[in-house]
Amino acid sequence: MLTKRLKIAVGMGAILGIFCIVGVGYRQGYAGNGLYLFAMWYNRIIMGLLIGFAGNWLKERYIIRGLILGTLVTTAFFLSTAFRDWPGFLAGIAYGVIIDYFATKYS
């Protein structure tokens, strides 16, 4: 069931994932980090998917919902870096709010 909300959320996750690739690539380099950069992008896709499915849960409080879901998803990736990628972790939390804002506003 591909709802408009789900499409917007996954699309925003993909777009923001590209920003993550640029940011992480700038900080850590692109050479030899292809799998890591792909995993970062994929994490943002999963974030968009989860936020897209969230639908009516805390509907009026989309900022809180985005914070909670963004934190949950980005923590999984943060654990895999042994708690070293703080900028990526914080960006993931912010991206959760951004994805939820656009998905709520335009769906």
Image: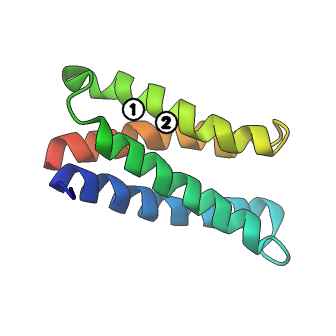
Query: Compared with residue 80, is residue 69 higher up or lower down, i.e. above or below?
Result: above
In percent of width and height, residue 62 lies at 28, 28
Q: How many marks?
A: 2
The residue to which callout 2 is attached is 70
The residue to which callout 1 is attached is 66
Task: Please identify the residue farthest to the bottom as the structure is shown.
Answer: 31
Identify the mark at residue 81; answer none if there is no mark: none
Q: Residues within 10 Å of mark 2 (few under 14, many from 20)?
A: many
In the image: residue 29, left or right of residue 49: right
Helix, strand or loop at disc 1? Answer: helix
Residue contact between numbered discs 1 and 2, judged by CB atoms under 8 Å: yes
Helix, strand or loop at disc 2? Answer: helix
Which of the 4 image quadrants contains residue 97? Answer: top left
In percent of width and height, residue 16 lies at 47, 58
Residue at the image position 83 percent from the left and 40 percent from the top = 84
Q: Amino acid at mark 2?
A: Gly
